[in-house]
Image (tube, rainbow, N blue to C red):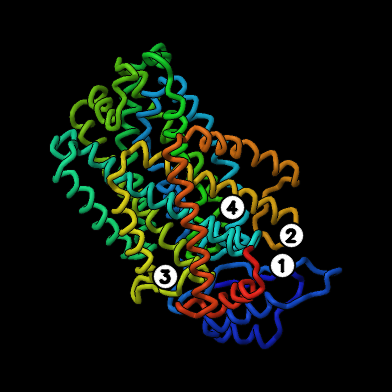
Amino acid sequence: MNREILMTTKQPSQSQEQQQQEGEHPQSQSTTAAQERHDTPPQDQQPRYTARQGGGPTSSHHQRKITLIPLVFLVYFEVAGGPYGAEKAVRAAGPLFTLLGFLIFPFAWGVPESLVTAELASAFPGNGGFVLWADHAFGPLAGSLLGTWKYLSIVINIAAYPALVADYVGGVAPAIAEPGRARTGTVIGMTLALSFLNYAGLSIVGWGAVTLGIVSLAPFLLMTAMSVPKLRPRRWASQVKGRKDWRMFFNTLFWNLNYWDSASTMAGEVDRPERTFPRALALAVVLIAVSYLLPLMAATGATDASPDAWVNGYLADAAGIIGGRWLKYWTGAGAVISSIGMFEAQMSSGAFQLLGMAELGLLPALFARRAARTGTPWVAIVASTAVTIAVSFLGFDDVVATANFLYSLGTLLEFASFLWLRAKHPELKRPYRVPLPLPALVAMCAVPSAFLAYVCVVAGWRVFAVAVGLTALGVGWHGVMRVCRVKKLLRFNSAVSADHREADAAGQTV
């Protein structure tokens, strides 16, 4: 359902209500919303503009199916998927700082971003998520740029999972661990196969995430329980040789605990998002913190390995030391299962982001096409798969740093959109509202924003150059889409692109 709620107190006319009750065609609903958006109320009574809450048109056959439990596990896989990939934090700074990081960071970083996501996802319950927020706060250019940053960070992040699986499988099949045809074939084959699974439908992906989450967490629960007699707290104080690599530590920590807002791009597919999103995010924060902290405490406290031994895949070795070979293989298989869950969840997020941008008129209408049976945005899935394969063979560290940098830029703009909408449009209907005044919200966003700025500063010149180039590409893409709208070179969502064509004709960029 594409619910149109105006920021003004104006009620819809009886004829409009009757049309909606009788099943008006989605495009007609969006056209009505776009016309309402251009109404000019008296300035002494209304805000500067009226914002259309929700996404673009949805398919008439499509119904929301994502409920609380599947959404919790989709968020879990968007953000974490288990402690796999956290090994380099131990290698970079030692066990103690790693444990402190995974104890503090989910709450200092995850809670503020979750609160922002819960409020805005319930206020704008349409596909596209954060793109909608920036578009309504600052205009089409901001929405397009935020979409570019976040989308590229998502697909770059997705590209790391097949490579991570290859690292774990390499413990059993060494040929896959080394560069060569076997590894290349494994990475490409897995990317194609998992992308095809995403085509099955978001409901299947959601309940599949529940199953994958339970199976992948099981060996860590066993490892934690079996490690208790072997724990020696002094091992948590082991030091790294030489200087600590803080850049690698924070990049690994951040990479393992970001993307809290990614599920918002599927808000149009969620049942009662105003209730479901806040609850799902609260449960996910606790689940994610525990899923990292307990296995890392067990593995660092029950084995004598130095921090230098902590490379990708070491958690499986630690499980073998604690519980035996069977637990090692189960943990290694859990890495594959977890990576499948993360791939599926984030591919869904990226695809529905493209669909939402198309419904908003920021991308051609082609990207909003859905499969007739499953309702999945198949064109967006194909495009995301192609981009993922293209970046699959970057180095793991480069993938992490570049994804973090782009995500940081996007999240800073996201926080700005949140604060701007609160300050300028306090009367905007928010089914869930963070129970804090504006100064407290500024302070809440300041802590994660400072960390985001740090991630950008320590990224390194190569990552910075890539990010600048991709940002320029995003601005150029927005300009190309603007020309295509004005000259009608491509087909856009007719209801919403009219808004953008007016802004283009007036020379507005935001």
Q: Give residue 322's position: percent from left, percent from top.
A: 26, 23
Residue 162 position (above or below residue 507) = above
Q: Give residue 95's position: percent from left, percent from top.
A: 41, 20
Going from N to C along the chain, the mark reached first, 1 or 4, is 1
Q: Give residue 407's position: percent from left, percent from top.
A: 49, 46
Labelled disc at residue 367: 3
**Can residue 5 be seen by looking at this rendering?**
yes
Residue matched to label 2: 425
Quadrant where the C terminus lies? bottom right
Circle 3/circle 1 CB separation < 8 Å: no
Going from N to C along the chain, the mark reached first, 2 or 1, is 1
Graded by Cα atoms within 10 Å as few (under 14), some (14 to 19) or many (20 or more), the crowding at tag 1 reads: some
Circle 2/circle 1 CB separation < 8 Å: yes
Going from N to C along the chain, the mark reached first, 4 or 2, is 4
Secondary structure at badge 1 equals loop
* Viewer-nearest of discs 4 and 3: 3
Disc 3 residue type (three-letter): Phe
Secondary structure at badge 2 equals loop
Secondary structure at badge 3 equals helix
Residue matched to label 1: 7
* Viewer-nearest of discs 3 and 2: 3
Toward the right, the furthest residue is 44
Q: Is residue 380 left or right of residue 53?
A: left
Residue 292 position (above or below residue 381) = above
The Cα–Cα distance between marks 2 and 1, rounded to whole angstroms, is 8 Å
Q: Residue at x 75, y 70 (%)?
A: 8
